[in-house]
Amino acid sequence: MTIVRPNLLLGLTATPERSDGQPIAQYFDPRPDGGPTVELRLWHALDLQLLAPFEYYACDDATDFSAVPWDRPGERDAIDKVVTGNDVRARLVVNEWRRLASDPLRSRALVFCVSVAHAEFMTSWLNRAGLPAACVVGTTPSEERQRAPQCLLRGELCALVTVDLYNEGIDLPMVDTLLLLRPTQSPVLFQQQIGRGLRLAPGKESCLVLDFVGQHRAEFRFDRLLSSLTGLSRRALTDGVENGFGSLPPGCHIHLQRQTREQVLRGLRSLTLQNWRRLRTELQTYAALRGRASVRLADFLHEQALELDDVYRASTGQGRSGWTALKRDAGLLVAEPGPEEDYFSRRMADLLHVDDPKRLDLMAAMGAGNGQLGSPDAGAALGLQMLAYQIDGQHNQTASHTAFAKRLAQNPAAREEFAELAGVLQARSSLPFVPVPGLEDTPLCLHAAYGAREVLTAVGWLTAERRAPFQAGVLPLTNRKAELLFVTLDKSEGYHDRIAYHDYAISPERFHWQTQNSAGRDTSGGQRYIESPGNGWQFQLFVRPRKGEAYRACGRVTLESAEGDRPMSIVWRLEVPLPVRLFREFSVLRGV
């Protein structure tokens, strides 16, 4: 991947054509070919400090946008009628800017409007309020358009008011304030506008974003906008709106004022609760427009702005779930179902966490190869056994990966779903395959996500002949002289002062862990820790934020210090530091 230097960042555009529906930030090098140097998602670029951090405020706004036909003809005109000439809203904009900015007169702001008339109206309002502003639109003479940014840079103006002109393609690194006065459901437009304020510039610490939200119908898609800004899933967004956004890139902040917060939560919850019947209707409508033959999971999710959880978690009283089940209920499958079609479709929900590239390749091959892989090598065979036990998670009986593959082959629609799901997961994963140090003989990938059954199968605890139960948080493997540490941070309540963290990342290289209450310095388990690494034992750390989620393979750890007794408090040093994203997720500071 090409390294991007901050002083070469000229343009940011959001492109919606990724199959997982997430916008991409494209950074362009000022070379003659004008081609993109590298593609990064907005939040990844913020993580890498290639962009200035933002402070985003969603401001309560009583303006009624409930009659706006979003994403349909007439949208712009309907917004224009509501906002142009609206003195109440204009006064709110001025007051909030003055309240939330340390000194608006020293701001270098872009004000995004919906029409030329709206831009002229807001320019007049700002100037009358003592905030020097210039209206710069498509019909503005080119000389004035070129002069306006220089006036903003010199402080002669504190705002440029525009409509569409500065959405993309113009480099204005001095901009440190954005006023979003044109509501939109488009994550592309939303991210383009916010991107105007995220250029790095000398003396610029962050960008203040004031978004005047207004009152919307219940079906307004707040999740599209906030996901494009944060990269969070709908579930994580709901948690962030309720409890605060603790996992943003460094220096970034999101605050939703009370009425806006309640409105956003209602919208997110209504989407989360969308039922199977609604999904079926959406698919039938989509198929009627696109044609049955071209209906693919990735396209349906993207074009309907849905998440995998919508298809694999939604259910009725009969427990319907999965892409194959949804297609059959929508009348898109006419062939007779296989003997376990519903079961396989429903159980694929337990694969949504997979981001290990080799496992995804294996899934795709299984789906495309009639459920068979010929004679897989030992690694592929173990990977298949991991898949078998992850899908058959509710069954305790043993089964070989060969038997699993034969069963899958008898269900053609479910097999195709296997391949489609693998494609969606591949599109949203950028994790390279790196063997876990100390477990190189297993298929496990460093920092990839796994269910407990998958890890236990990979290390040989679960086999085709043996499926022993496992409930504890630690698993000593005497034959390997390796102990697996399964850690649940349980941060779902982590925003309250009464919660005490016992397990957390201190830094990317160090992790604080508390043993079970039975472990003491005089016990065999406690001595294994204290006497390592001289005793030949190694310890492997697997961490998940909360129960019900997948573990991350964090790799081998070595003892740095141990204190206390029953339980013991241990600080481990990670052989490979945690990536920034995982450190933020596992850090005790996450909710602070």
Image (cartoon, grey):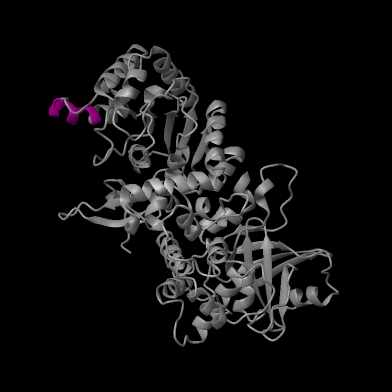
Looking at the picture, tell me which residue is in the foreground, 550 or 163. 550
Q: Is residue 315 left or right of residue 101?
A: right
What is the magenta segment's predominant secondary structure?
A: helix
Above or below, comparing residue 157 to residue 127 in the picture: below
**Residue 591 appears in the figure:** yes
> Which residues fall within the magenta stretch?
141-149
Q: Is residue 115 left or right of residue 308?
A: left
In which quarter of the view is residue 420 placed?
bottom left
Above or below, comparing residue 566 to residue 239 in the picture: below
Taking the spot 36% from the left edge, 19% from the top edge, the residue there is 83
In which quarter of the view is residue 400 placed?
bottom right
Q: Is residue 313 left or right of residue 127?
A: right
Residue 144: x %, y % from top left = 17, 25
Residue 128: x %, y % from top left = 34, 11
The quarter in which the C terminus is drawn is top right
Q: Residue furthest right?
A: 522
Looking at the picture, tell me which residue is in the foreground, 151 or 383. 383
Residue 148, magenta (yes or no)? yes
Looking at the picture, tell me which residue is in the foreground, 155 or 530. 530
Looking at the picture, tell me which residue is in the foreground, 193 or 289. 289
Residue 513: x %, y % from top left = 71, 62
Residue 355: x %, y % from top left = 49, 65
**Residue 441 appears in the figure:** no
